[in-house]
Amino acid sequence: MNLYLGVWEGTRESLIGKWLRWFDEQGNLLLWSSELVEQEK
């Protein structure tokens, strides 16, 4: 699958902090489902 776990700093559900997020081989952040929905709007 070539996925990598990394730390992302940002806001999630009105909480600011550091979050564990998945990244692809090129270092692109994989979006949460709620982010995908927002992106499609």
Image (spheres, rainbow, N blue to C red):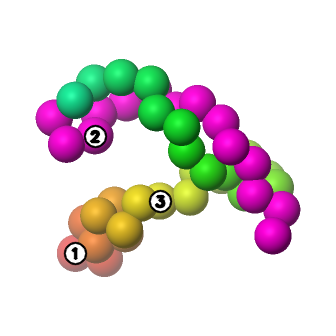
Residue found at the far bottom of this picture: 40
Q: Mainly helix, strand or loop, the magenta region?
A: strand
- What SS does tag 1 mark? loop
Image point (83%, 62%), residue name: 2
Q: Position of residue 3 (x, y in %)?
A: 75, 58
Image point (28%, 72%), residue name: 37
Vertical position of residue 33 compared to residue 12: above or below: below
Q: Position of residue 1 (x, y in %)?
A: 81, 70
The CA distance from mark 2 to mark 1 is 18 Å
Q: Which residue is mark 1?
A: 41
> In terms of image quadrants, where is residue 10?
top left
Residue type indicated by callout 2: Arg
Q: Which residue is mark 3?
A: 31
Classed neighbour count for the residue bearing mark 1: other residues with Cα under 10 Å, few (<14), some (14–19), many (≥20):
few
The CA distance from mark 2 to mark 3 is 12 Å
Give the magenta range.
Answer: 1-14
Vertical position of residue 25 compared to residue 9: above or below: below
